[in-house]
Amino acid sequence: MNEQSSVKDLLPYEELVVAVELPSAVAARLGQAAGALRKTVNPVQMRIFWIPPTVSHISLLYTPRIRTDMVPTMLELMKGAVAGTAPVTLRIRGLELHQEAGEGEPESVNAIWARVVGAEALSGLQSSLADVVGEIDAGFAPPDIRLHVPVALADEFNNTREFASAFVEWQDYDFGEVVVNQLAVLRANPRQGDKDRPFVAIDTLPFA
């Protein structure tokens, strides 16, 4: 056993997501959109992983590797950070193709997102939660990324006429309202390796 693996065994860690979970009706509509688009995808031209609608959520924060023994402390601090927050109403409206550029490479589509309308109302809460994680991990720097609902991740994307035609129908579609009065804390990538359950809920952060 090398030194790196022995340290890993001695210091087990968790990777957590603080998220807004979606109502089942909204998740079902996102699943319909994904199903319609999936029918147009030729796997030779595109390599896309479709996220199960049962785990659809809006990620506010993704923690680094937090030592397992520090997780209870972090959860208590997070509960204090959100306590007293007024409920927030959001809408999930329309899909978009998210593009990013790798180092020295042109931009390319690497995800399909659903847009969150009214997400700016959560920005203060996001900052407070990031401060909590920073108390546990001094090197933590939250990613500067617009809040969204991931629908699919693309390893390779080449737009086709069939896909583009289907996508137009969902660009401004209203998937529904989301009333936020608590946040969920999810464990990411559970060690069981169940691809249909990439997240497991471990706690909630109630506003009231």
Image: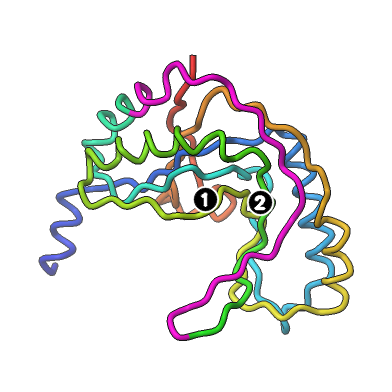
Q: In the image, what residue occupies the spot 77% across and 42% down? A: 28
Residue at 41% x, 55% y: name it. 143
On the image, the x and y values in percent for residue 2 come to 13, 69
Percent across and percent down for residue 37 are 81, 63
Determine crowd level at label 1: few under 14, some 14-19, many 20+ residues with C-alpha closer than 10 A. some
Q: Is residue 193 left or right of residue 12?
A: right
- Residue that carries the numbered disc 2 in the rendered image: 52
Identify the image quadrant of residue 26: top right
Point out the stretch of residues depicted in magenta. 78-104
Q: Are marks 2 and 1 in contact (CB under 8 Å)?
A: yes
Query: Compared with residue 135, is residue 111 higher up or lower down, i.e. above or below?
Result: below
Q: Secondary structure at mark 2?
A: loop
Q: Amino acid at mark 1?
A: Pro
The residue that mark 1 highlights is 198
- Residue 150: mark: none
Per the model, the C-alpha gap separating discs 2 and 1 is 9 Å
Query: Is 91 inside the magenta-drawn segment?
Result: yes
Going by the image, does 148 lie left or right of 183? right
Q: Secondary structure at mark 1?
A: loop
Instruction: Check if residue 102 falls in the magenta segment.
Output: yes
Q: Residue at x 70, y 78 (%)?
A: 46
Which of these two is toward me, 1 or 96? 96
Out of 35 and 83, give the one closest to the viewer. Answer: 83
Task: Pinpoint residue 157: horizontal percent, then vertical percent.
Answer: 67, 77
Q: Tell which residue pokes out farthest to the top in this image.
A: 208
Task: Say what amino acid the circle numbered 2 marks.
Answer: Pro
Q: In this picture, is 204 found above or below 98?
A: above
99 sits left or right of 96 in the view: left
Q: Residues within 10 Å of mark 2 (few under 14, many from 20)?
A: some
Q: Quadrant of the N terminus?
A: bottom left
